[in-house]
Amino acid sequence: MFSIIQAAGWPIYPLLLASIIAVALIIERATALRRSKIVPAGLLASVAGDYRQGGVSEQMLQRLERHSPLGRVFAAALRNLKSSREVMREAVEEAGRGAAHEMSRFLTSLGTIASISPLMGLFGTVVGMIEIFGSPTASGNNPQALAHGISVALYNTGFGLIIAIPSMIFYRHFRALVDGLAIEMEQQAVKLVELVQGERK
């Protein structure tokens, strides 16, 4: 592996850096976007039970805000309990947009790496081809040396694709996951609003 990196030349170092960043972002988002962490099971029933028993308290709201993104959405709804249903919905939507933005953190960077990695690899290949054909040596008269030089130049393109393919797969997976979690949070928040407004049992 080290010999390939040496053979590919200096253009492969930005690709190596991009691969390290991509792996770090994938691990971070896979950890942060666990369903149990974003939309904990049973939270709606727990909040509804606490509300029926003792109403809304500042301590309860602070606990919800620290609990999870869904808890923050619930807290936004309960803070506007005495307002109209439209105001509660606006508060829920605003908190939901904030939670979705937080869940989308670093996804733009991952998508950018997925998009530019093939271009970075192509740039490395072009640099390698320029070095081959612009060399003052007689490699152009030696088919074996020329073939070796071209294979070395193509390492960059191959490495760029190796980075881009999994990065794009995880980027699209995380985007779909964020959208799904945001919709689920909104649905549960609407249920909570209907519960506290007495429209649902």
Image: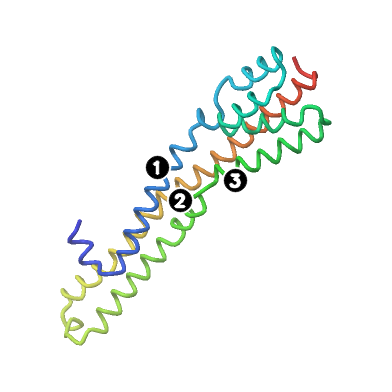
The image shows residue 19 at horizontal and vertical percentages of 35, 54
Which amino acid type is marked by label 3?
His
Which amino acid type is marked by label 1?
Ile
Q: Earlier in the sequence, mark 2 or mark 1?
A: 1
Disc number at residue 27? 1
Task: Quote the CA–CA distance across marks 2 and 3.
Answer: 20 Å
Q: Earlier in the sequence, mark 2 or mark 3?
A: 3
The quarter of the rendered structure image containing the N terminus is bottom left
Disc number at residue 120? none
Q: Nearer the viewer, residue 59 or 6?
A: 59
Q: Residues within 10 Å of mark 1 (few under 14, many from 20)?
A: few
Residue pictured at 49% horizontal, 50% vertical: 106
Q: Residues within 10 Å of mark 3 (few under 14, many from 20)?
A: few
Left or right for 4, reference 172: left
Disc number at residue 101? 3
Regarding mark 3 in the picture, which secondary structure is present there?
A: helix
Residue pictured at 71% horizontal, 39% vertical: 93
Q: Mark 2 points at which residue?
A: 168
